[in-house]
Amino acid sequence: MVMTKENVFGSEGWTPKRLGNLNGKTFVITGANAGAGYEASKIFLTKGACVVMLNRNAEKSAKAIKTLQSEIGADADVRFIQMDLADLASVREAAASVNAEVPHIDAFISNAAIAQVATQQFTKDGFESQLGTNHYGHFLLTNLLFERIVESKGRIVVVGSNGHKGGLKRIQFDDMNFDKNYNPHVTYCHSKFAQMMFAYDLEQRVKKAGLPISVYVCHPGMSKTTLAQEESGGIIKFLLRLATPFAQSAERGAWPEVLCATEDNLKEVAYYGPTNRAEMVGPVGECKLETSVLNADEARKLWELSEKETKISWDF
Ligand SMILES: NC(=O)c1ccc[n+]([C@@H]2O[C@H](COP(=O)([O-])OP(=O)(O)OC[C@H]3O[C@@H](n4cnc5c(N)ncnc54)[C@H](OP(=O)(O)O)[C@@H]3O)[C@@H](O)[C@H]2O)c1
């Protein structure tokens, strides 16, 4: 008999119905002008929180803010700071603006990503585009906001992917740019694996250092967003574009990150997201983690490489 793990949030799973008033709370989120990040922002704002979006595209951001304020109310406290994760100088500038303008961070959410990039491309700093944007960009940003998050006794939420269970299931240290074996999907999975490996390593370091913050990891399952690029191919784009039983709305895709940003008493070294149909849709709860992402030696090596590539020193 197959034993189904009980969902600690009940048979319906975690839903925004569990949220109380979020007045006075501030959420800083990357990539919030579309998809799950936009929907998460909408939920936070509806509950009275302040949202600071770190987005690449100014025009899309102004439009997103206008729509949010027309739906929620003109006083919805949402603002935007321009940041391109594919350009480390831009990440530094945006982090300086956050540190100057945002005195308190209740949760910082690494949500933005690019995926399934059809051909090998590079960020401004010369990294394979998905690794550079999704991992190195967020690694640097997290470091630059870390002091403010610690002062705030806040939390860090990393949006991962079930892709960490596919692809290589390891970091390809001898060819981080995939010069020899570029593949849009495998390389995307590699970038999400790196983000998650970093998150669990950070969680352990925070715990060892006794810092008053938490780090949580989640995923949106298979949600109908704009993630898979127009020029990319493959099953992921196909599933995302269709109303299949294996794909859900962007709004539901946002629930795991809202859960991780707000819920008390979450488990450590856990992975939250939809729990049905190969964890692509359904009630939000704890999901199965591929344990190779917890490899401590590999995580240390990735951390040190990330420090070197982003030109920071961050050992604690
Ligand atoms: N949708 C899924 O089924 C699925 C499955 C597994 C994991 N995920 C994860 O869920 C998270 C949210 O994705 P989504 O599906 O909501 O995708 P999405 O609709 O494409 O939204 C991604 C956001 O990231 C932003 N972004 C992309 N490149 C950026 C850059 N260089 N600098 C700053 N922002 C940038 C985009 O902004 P622009 O408008 O400027 O492009 C957009 O706001 C991602 O971490 C993704 O890996 C999604």
Image (cartoon, grey):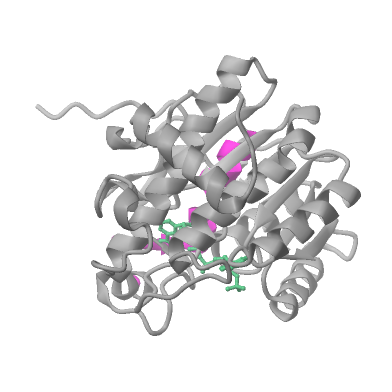
User: In the rendering, at what x and y percent does residue 186 appear?
Assistant: 28, 61
Q: Residue at x 44, y 32 (%)?
A: 300
- Above or below: residue 128 compared with residue 134: below
Residue 79 magenta-highlighted: no
Residue 229 sits in which quadrant? bottom left
- Above or below: residue 160 compared with residue 231: above
User: In the rendering, at what x and y percent does residue 305 appear?
Assistant: 48, 45
Q: Given the current orientation, which residue lies at the most extreme left position?
A: 1
Q: Given the current orientation, which residue lies at the most extreme bottom position?
A: 231
Residue 153 sits in which quadrant? top right
Tell me the quarter of the image containing the N terminus. Answer: top left
- Above or below: residue 225 compared with residue 285: below
Q: Main secondary structure of the magenta part?
A: helix
Residue 260 magenta-highlighted: yes
Q: Residue at x 34, y 49 (%)?
A: 173
Can residue 286 be seen here? The reply is: no
User: In the rendering, at what x and y percent does residue 113 appear?
Assistant: 51, 62
Residues 151 and 274: in front is 151
Can residue 25 be seen here? The reply is: yes
Residues 139 and 49: in front is 139
Query: In the shown orientation, is residue 44 left or right of residue 120?
Result: right
In this picture, which residue range is highlighted in magenta?
243-262
